[in-house]
Image (cartoon, rainbow, N blue to C red):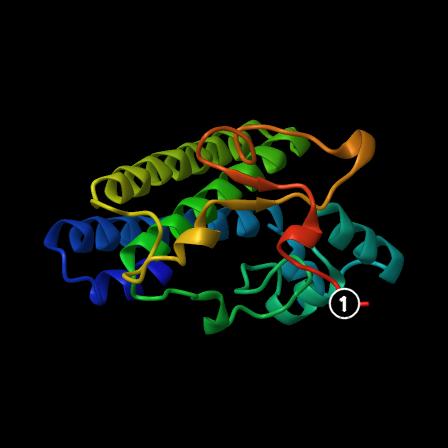
Amino acid sequence: MRYFVQGLGEDDVGRKDMLLDIATEELSHLEVVGSIVTMLNKGLKAHLAEGQMKEAELYLMVGASGTTAKESILFGGGPALCDSAGVPWTAAYIDSRGEPTVDLRSNIAAEARAKIVYERLINITDDPGVKDALGFLMTREVAHQKSFEKALYAIENNFPTGKLPGIEKYASMYVNTSQGEGDATGPWNSGGEWDRIDNLEEVMPADG
């Protein structure tokens, strides 16, 4: 839904096409995930409906499927649009800003998060079919991330985001608030492009 919203509001023809293509493919991924959930819970719905098992045995079956008693009772072992804690999906997850340099970075991060979650799921299942399906989904997230990165780099002057420049004297300032053994340096805070401030009183004088 995030990509659909972005695509519908995008003026650039190329980015619009890419966003709607990826949005459409992501909907097919929902079908794959839903099918996996249904497959893993196969047989559970009948047992719940017909009361064929003792209470303790039924509870064990619910747990063995990887779902929760709440999800099993409410959704009958089928897929549900909620997170792992049973919290329903909401439009609040769509945080698009209508600025390509912002939204593309957000999309890259979203694909990276999805990739690492699929990777962890692959590592905890021993079902070959599930591993194959999750491996496919994981790899497609990598491809989407690559597309978003290419689209971002194709925008001239894509950093910083937006139109207004930062205040020059603060734009390259790194305020070092660390001292002692944990005080580290790297390309993120040292070198010719950084104005490193180690003495906070130079920029933030304290009265008294």
When asked about the image quadrant of residue 102, the answer is bottom left
In the picture as drawn, the residue positioned furthest to the front comes out as 208
Which residue is more in the foreground, 178 or 148? 178
Residue 90 versus residue 13 in the image, above or below: below
In the picture of the structure, the residue carrying the numbered disc 1 is 207
Seen at 48% across and 41% down, the residue is: 112
The foreground one among 155 and 107 is 155
Residue type pointed to by label 1: Asp
Q: Position of residue 52 (x, y in %)?
A: 76, 60
State the residue at coordinates (69%, 61%).
85
Residue 14 percent across, percent down from the top left: 13, 49
Q: How far across and down, in percent of the image, does residue 104 sit?
A: 34, 50
Residue furthest to the left: 13
- Tally of numbered tags: 1
Classify 10 Å Cα crowding around label 1: few (below 14), some (14-19), many (20 and above).
few
- Residue appearing at x 44%, y 50% in the figure: 171
State which quarter of the image contains the N terminus.
bottom left
Identify the residue at image location x=48%, y=29%.
132
**Image position, residue 86 (x, y; %):** 66, 65
Quadrant location, the C terminus: bottom right
Lateral position of residue 115 relative to residue 40, left or right: left
Q: Secondary structure at mark 1?
A: loop
Q: Nearer the viewer, residue 1 or 25?
A: 1
* One can see residue 154 in this view: yes
Of residues 141 and 146, the one nearer the viewer is 146
- 105 left or right, relative to 80: left
Note whether residue 66 is visible: no
Q: Which residue is most to the right?
A: 56
